């Protein structure tokens, strides 16, 4: 391979890795969003608030998923 081909192959591999990271983060956010929807559905249906530690854990996972998306987007925007 010539240096240009190696550079192009490396850039393509980097791009694919970024897309894979973004897709994984998006999937994680979708899963946590689904959990949040189920949580609020039960809250509205039953009117009973679950244990506070359950709510805090769910919200922490949603926040972590959003942070993962933000990080993946930043990597794509920066071209890393």
Image: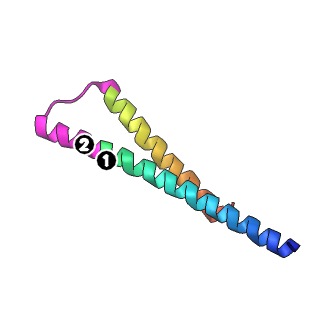
Q: Contact (CB < 8 A) between labels 2 and 1?
A: yes
Viewer-proximal residue, 14 or 36? 14
Q: Residues within 10 Å of mark 1 (few under 14, many from 20)?
A: few
Let me know if residue 25 appears in the view: yes
The quarter of the image holding the N terminus is bottom right
Q: Residue at x 21, y 30 (%)?
A: 49
Residue 48 vertical position relative to residue 22 in the rendered view, above or below: above
Label of residue 34 in the image: 1
The picture places residue 37, in percent across and down from the top left corner, at: 26, 46
The picture places residue 35, in percent across and down from the top left corner, at: 31, 42
Label of residue 38 in the image: 2
What residue range appears in magenta?
36-53
Q: Residue furthest right?
A: 2
Residue 49 located within the stretch drawn in magenta: yes
Residue 65 vertical position relative to residue 5 in the rendered view, above or below: above
Q: CA separation, marks 2 and 1?
A: 6 Å
């Amino acid at each position: 391979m010539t240096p240009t081909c190696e550079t192009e192959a490396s850039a393509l591999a980097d791009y694919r890795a970024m897309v894979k990271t973004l897709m994984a983060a998006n999937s994680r956010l979708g899963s946590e969003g689904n959990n949040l929807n189920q949580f609020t559905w039960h809250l509205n249906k039953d009117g009973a608030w679950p244990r506070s530690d359950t709510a805090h854990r769910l919200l922490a996972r949603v926040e972590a998923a959003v942070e993962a998306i933000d990080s993946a987007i930043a990597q794509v925007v920066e071209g890393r």
